[in-house]
Amino acid sequence: MFDNKSILITGGTGSFGQQYTKTLLQCYKPKRVIILSRDELKQFEMQQKYHAPCMRYFIGDVRDGERLKQAFRDVDYVIHAAALKQVPAAEYNPMECIKTNIDGAENVIQAAIANNVKKVIALSTDKAANPINLYGATKLASDKLFVAANNMVGQGETRFAAVRYGNVVGSRGSVVPFFKSKIAEGVDSLPITHPDMTRFWITLQDGVDFVLKNFARMQGGEIFVPKLPSVRITELASAYAPDLRHDIVGIRPGEKMHEIMCPADDSHHTIEFDDHFVIAPSIKFFGCENDFYTNALGEYGKAVTDGYEYNSGTNPHFLTTEEILALDNAS
């Protein structure tokens, strides 16, 4: 579906954007792949790796709505990956997080509608479910904006959806590169926030593939959630440094013990498919009766039980140390 199409990625110089670009170039023949981000150095570095004739690099910030409207001209598909994502940084700089993650989301929506973009998928996070930190709260607000945007298009064809998943193996600023840097320094212990902490775990390529497939699945208004394994933070540390002791340093500002991707309060909107869940919109779309139990690929889902919660701490699938390393090597 991406052959001879124009695809724009906001925040495209990040880990996800670069892997998505690599996959598009390897598997499809796009007309244009547009990387929109605000860091000229990261764009310069990315251009050294990805310089196919279809590549375009635009300097711009999602906070600037007029720039987005220019950049979205004649674009078919948008992946909205730009965000301020560091939990402690968001706690200390709340308005900056709000401007990017909420105001930026609204700007993406308005630019997409103004340019009749076919489909938009916004990247969400497990922290948007029952949020306790500002980052999660802003991403929940963003999710709500993208769901409701399907009611704003009028007679237009633009459709919006979101993808929510867990921690990405080896992404910039995440715990695995941090552990590896500490090990390389020759430390005698690894800092652990809490011995019982768990997280959902996904490789970068699996995240990219999930988003790609959901462009084909989506009708508009869904929040897609993949079925993922969980990791215990202690198992993660032991996988990379089995001989180092663990130094318990305490939970950082805004962190949870476990992450949730499908909250119990949304169980009456949650539909289970073979390899993913869909959280259907709680609002009705004007003039449209989408049946979210059957997606655009003809896959069939079923309702979850009342009160069902998809929680990293109660997930039936936990990775062993061997599986953690295998996923890291495959990423």
Image (cartoon, rainbow, N blue to C red):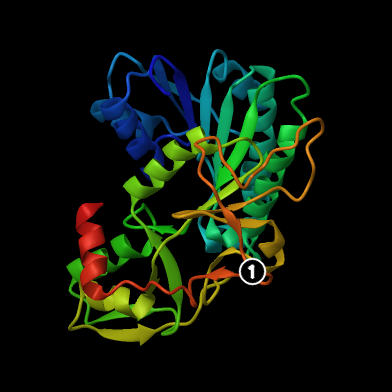
Left or right: 84 as drawn, with respect to 134: left
**Residue 65 is drawn in which quadrant?**
top right
Left or right: 13 as drawn, with respect to 79: left
The answer to whether residue 212 is visible is yes
Q: Which residue is mark 1?
A: 305
Residue 147: where, in percent of width, then height? Answer: 69, 42
Residue 59: where, in percent of width, then height? Answer: 48, 25
Which residue corresponds to the image point at 54% horizontal and 47% vertical from the top-left? 300
Left or right: 297 as drawn, with respect to 267: left
Residue 44 vs residue 287, the one in the foreground: 287
Residue 260: where, in percent of width, then height? Answer: 56, 67
Which residue corresponds to the image point at 61% horizontal and 35% vertical from the top-left? 219
Residue 54 vs residue 163, the one in the foreground: 163
Q: Which SS class for mark 1? A: loop
Residue 213 vs residue 235, the one in the foreground: 213
Packing grade of label 1 (10 A; few <14, some 14-19, many >=20) is few
Q: Is residue 144 above or below residue 323?
A: above
- Type of residue at label 1? Thr
